[in-house]
Amino acid sequence: MTDVDTALVLAGGRGTRLLPLTARTPKPMLPFCGASLVAGMVRRLAPHGVRHVILAVGAEAGPFAPLAGEVATDGLTVEVVTEEVPLDTAGGARLALRGLDRPVLVLNGDVLTDLDVGSVLARHHAEAADATLALTRVVDTSTFGVCLLDGVRITGFVEKPPPGTLPGHDTVNAGTYVLGPGVLDGFPDGPLSFERTVFPGLLAAGRRLVGHVAEGVWSDLGTPERLLDGQRTVLDGGVAWPPLADLPADAGGVRVGAGAEVAPDAVLRGPVVLGAGVRVAAGAVVGPYAVMAPGATVGAGARVADAAVGPRTAIGAGAAVTRALLGADVEVAPGAVVADLAVVGDGERVAA
């Protein structure tokens, strides 16, 4: 058993690599396999005793308001903490956690993982750690900060070492931590980074940092390609994703929400998800690896595959949407082609 009932999600990033999808919607609130991305992430924490979720966001709290309703059935409550000025990862965490006198789970708001959170929490308590970092192994260390380990204890950090220059050390920060109470105290006010300042500073002060190496799925969803690849992983069952459990699949991997209408001669190729109220017209083919958000429509003879389609988006007759991301209220003209990692922002129109 653990006493960690609070999780902090770092959700203040601007999501520039996913523009224009993130022009109006913060990256953690983008639709992803049946709910917002962050809703799926935090619902995975409920079985491990987490009951309260704090979001450390930028200056605007409004876009995160729907999250409370998405996670209420799991017994989770949501608190949103804003920053008047950007405070970096640990600065935002310190602001959000001020006054908390017990350990807290911290996670990045854009990472897809099948990490066993329970094992990370157990390791933290068993080692009486001040901070525990979930770690993942990588082949190419040149784009990451590598954690040096002596057993389970973290002894140092090396930023972006060329491959092969640190034999036996290939573990990098996986973006999930357990922090003991007060570990952020004593650092200077203002912007503060976990990677550059907090963790090296704790080591220098003689605090006990522990690493928990996890095998399995770990992916940053911050680019169009990675977001679509992450969707494929979830649809293939590579990561347990609670929002999909709310919409059971048939034998072919087809999930159809309440009120969805599919013409008799339309074809659904699983894995595929149709949200509530989606309409698929005659002769259309949807899937595989297509997720249609609530209220989206597919015109007669259109094709949609390997794509994420936002709420109320209309795909015209004979159009083709493949390997693409479409925001909310998009209009794809009849006969138009949207493909090759195209990203279409909310309310835009794609001409034929």
Image (cartoon, rainbow, N blue to C red):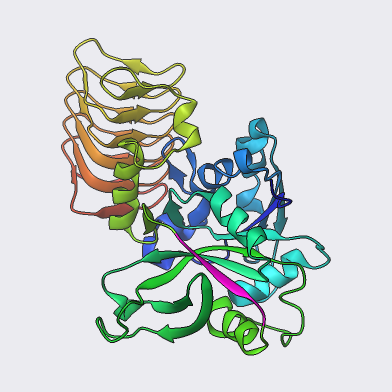
Point out residue 319 in the picture as x, y percentages from the top left corner: 18, 36
Q: Residue at x 43, y 43 (%)?
A: 32
Image quarter of the C terminus: top left
Query: Does 100 lie within the magenta span?
Result: no
Query: Does 211 lie within the magenta span?
Result: yes
Q: Residue at x 20, y 43 (%)?
A: 322
Point out residue 190 in the picture as x, y percentages from the top left corner: 70, 83
Nearer to the camera, 320 or 85: 85
Point out residue 133 in the picture as x, y percentages from the top left corner: 54, 67
Q: Residue at x 19, y 49 (%)?
A: 339
Residue furthest to the top? 264
Q: Which residues are magenta?
A: 207-213
Asked if 115 appears above or below 191 in the picture, the reply is above
Q: In this rendering, does residue 4 appear at all?
A: yes
Q: Main secondary structure of the magenta part?
A: strand
Nearer to the camera, 93 or 13: 93
Instruction: Quadrant for residue 127, please give it.
Output: bottom right
Point out residue 338 in the picture as x, y percentages from the top left corner: 21, 46
Asked if 279 appears above or below 221 in the picture, the reply is above
Q: Is residue 315 left or right of residue 207?
A: left
Asked if 181 appears above or below 48 in the picture, the reply is below
Image quarter of the N terminus: top right
Q: In this rendering, does residue 333 appear at all?
A: no
